[in-house]
Image (spheres, rainbow, N blue to C red):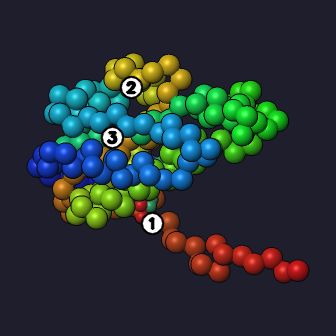
Amino acid sequence: MTRSFSTAPLRPGLIDDLLDSARRGPSAGNTQATGFVVLDRPELVQAYWDTTLPEPKRSSFRWQSMLEAPALVLVTTTPDAYVDRYAESDKARPGLGDNIEGWPVPFWWVDAGAVVQNVLLLAVEAELGACLFGVFAHEAAVADRFDLADGERIVATIAIGEPLPDSPGRSAKRPRPPISSVIRRPVD
Ligand SMILES: Cc1cc2nc3c(=O)[nH]c(=O)nc-3n(C[C@H](O)[C@H](O)[C@H](O)COP(=O)(O)O)c2cc1C
């Protein structure tokens, strides 16, 4: 994650190209209900921070230069689209086409996570920095401010821009677990 950005605007078209590639991730039932709300004009970026980080919290925010990122991408998903898809004849299975509660693993978050990782990788490939962060309690306010559709959920926001040196986040102190504890092979 990059948490410090220059104010340099991105090349026109770059974000759209990047997101077009990023959406080609695995998608349950090929539902493809991950969406993007792109805030790449200064007044929209400002409106996002006004909604999610108003004063007095803004001034004491640890990563002031993260607020300089020229583009913010809201990654969204529409759970009901998955319910509708899994009600179709080739996918009909007990429960999944009835409501979101019937899903043991809610695949809309899985699909969106794959798309998010693609965005992060493509940003690095374009020699940019990116940071994924949560919307937390501000989801309803952000959805309202940027006209999301009914039932459209915000998965997270990704800041994208030219990276500047930054200090690592608190979570970076957490060690990467040994690979032997991550990969397991059950005995017979
Ligand atoms: C679902 C999710 C939510 C995250 N939310 C935040 C956040 O709110 N603020 C933040 O600074 N980083 C956030 N991160 C970034 C993680 O802190 C970061 O990926 C992790 O510490 C590993 O660091 P690295 O990605 O730089 O290797 C989030 C990451 C994920 C996957």
Q: Whole-percent x and y of residue 89? A: 73, 34
Which is more N-terminal, label 1 or label 3?
A: 3
Task: Tell me how far mark 3 sits from mark 2, CA to CA.
Answer: 12 Å
Task: Tell me how far mark 2 sits from mark 1, CA to CA.
Answer: 31 Å
Which is more N-terminal, label 2 or label 3?
A: 3
- Tag 1's secondary structure? helix
Residue 161 is at least partly visible in this image: yes
- Tag 2's secondary structure? helix
45, 115: nearer the viewer: 115
Task: Tell me how far mark 3 sits from mark 1, CA to CA.
Answer: 27 Å
Q: Residue at x 38, y 26 (%)?
A: 142
For marks 2 and 1, give the one nearer the viewer.
2
Q: Which residue is mark 1?
A: 173
Which amino acid, mark 2? Answer: Val
Q: Residue at x 52, y 72 (%)?
A: 176
Q: Is residue 89 left or right of residue 16?
A: right
Q: Whole-percent x and y of residue 149? A: 45, 21
Q: Residue 142: which numbered mark, if any?
A: 2
Query: Vertically, is 93 above or below 151?
Result: below
Q: Residues within 10 Å of mark 2 (few under 14, many from 20)?
A: many
Residue 167 is at least partly visible in this image: no
For marks 3 and 2, give the one nearer the viewer.
3
Asked if labels 2 and 3 touch by Cβ distance under 8 angstroms, the answer is no
Asked if labels 1 and 2 touch by Cβ distance under 8 angstroms, the answer is no
Q: Whole-percent x and y of residue 88? A: 69, 32
Q: Whole-percent x and y of residue 58? A: 27, 35
Q: Quadrant of the N terminus?
A: bottom left
Which amino acid, mark 1? Answer: Lys
Query: Vertically, is 171 above or below 55?
Result: below
